[in-house]
Amino acid sequence: MQRFEDQTVIVTGGGRETGVSHARGFAAEGANVVIAGVLDEECRWLARELGDRALFTPLDVTDEEEWDATVHAAEQAFWRHTIAVNLTGAYLGIRAAARSMRKAGAGSIVNISSTAAFGAAPGASAESASEWGVRGLTKAAALELGRDNIRVNSVHPGRVLTPMADEGPADVALSSARLVANPTEVTQLVLFLASSDASFSTGSEFLIDGGLLLGRALPRGPVVAAVA
């Protein structure tokens, strides 16, 4: 389990030995890493080493404006990444699959989203925007592809028993008996929608959250941490 999956960390002094070690450690645990410092060449080299989930920004820690610029750069870079994965990825998948399905004369597309498509949470604007976008994309695609006998639906799980699932606040009651779904329960819904058993379902969203949205707020957004 990666402890910092989908979280963003700013490491100052990123060009020096300790900063390099911190950055590598967070990256190995799944974090987006902003490498900030005054040693441009060393920081850029480290960012290249860590790959797409790393970003270099120049930062003199005594400069308030550079701090603001660093945080802004982190928000912009990794906000775009969330949008690209959640929404652009779904769009590209629909476009590619539809070409093949037209040749076959029929098809079913099931977009996997989340309960974030039905609300908002502090610190999770990119997640909310992209998942709401998947709902709209699903409906638009269903209208456009219906003439080709292609159905498009979306599935919105709550918490699922995977290494990425968090337990959430323990003091908020749910209206259902269980907090977390087994992955096979989500799979059964996906299989149904993909099959001819769901032949009259298109352009719809299917919640599978154990009543999560009935009785509690959406999970809080990803943590942004700064490490000196």
Image: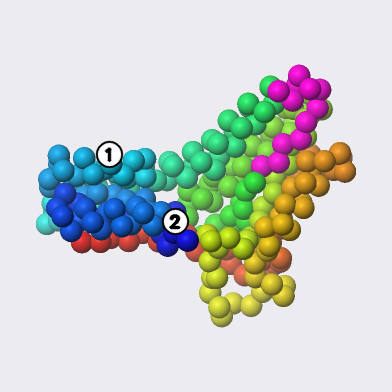
Report which residue position mark 1 lands on.
48
Residue 71 on image: x %, y %: 29, 51
Find residue 207 and report its image quarter. Answer: bottom right
Relative to 36, residue 121 above or below: below
Residue 177 on image: x %, y %: 72, 75
Q: Is residue 188 left or right of residue 171?
A: right
Q: Is residue 159 left or right of residue 153?
A: left
Tell me if I can see residue 118 in this picture. no
Residue 170 on image: x %, y %: 55, 78
Relative to 163, residue 89 above or below: above
Q: Residues within 10 Å of mark 2 (few under 14, many from 20)?
A: some
Q: Choose between 150 and 101: the one closer to the eye.
A: 101
In percent of the image, x 55 and y 57: which residue is there? 120
Q: Choose between 126 and 43: the one closer to the eye.
A: 43
In percent of the image, x 74 and y 33: which residue is there? 142
Q: Choose between 29 and 158: the one closer to the eye.
A: 29
Tell me if I can see residue 178 in this picture. yes
Q: Is residue 211 left or right of residue 9?
A: right
Residue 93 covered by magenta stretch? no
Sooner in the amino-acid sequence: mark 2 or mark 1: 2
Q: Residues within 10 Å of mark 1 (few under 14, many from 20)?
A: few
In percent of the image, x 47 and y 55: which residue is there? 124
In percent of the image, x 61 and y 32: which residue is there? 93
Question: Which numbered dot is residue 5?
Answer: 2
Magenta-drawn segment: 100-111
**Separation of residues labelled 2 and 1 (CA atoms):** 20 Å
The amino acid on which the numbered mark 1 sits, given as a three-letter code, is Arg
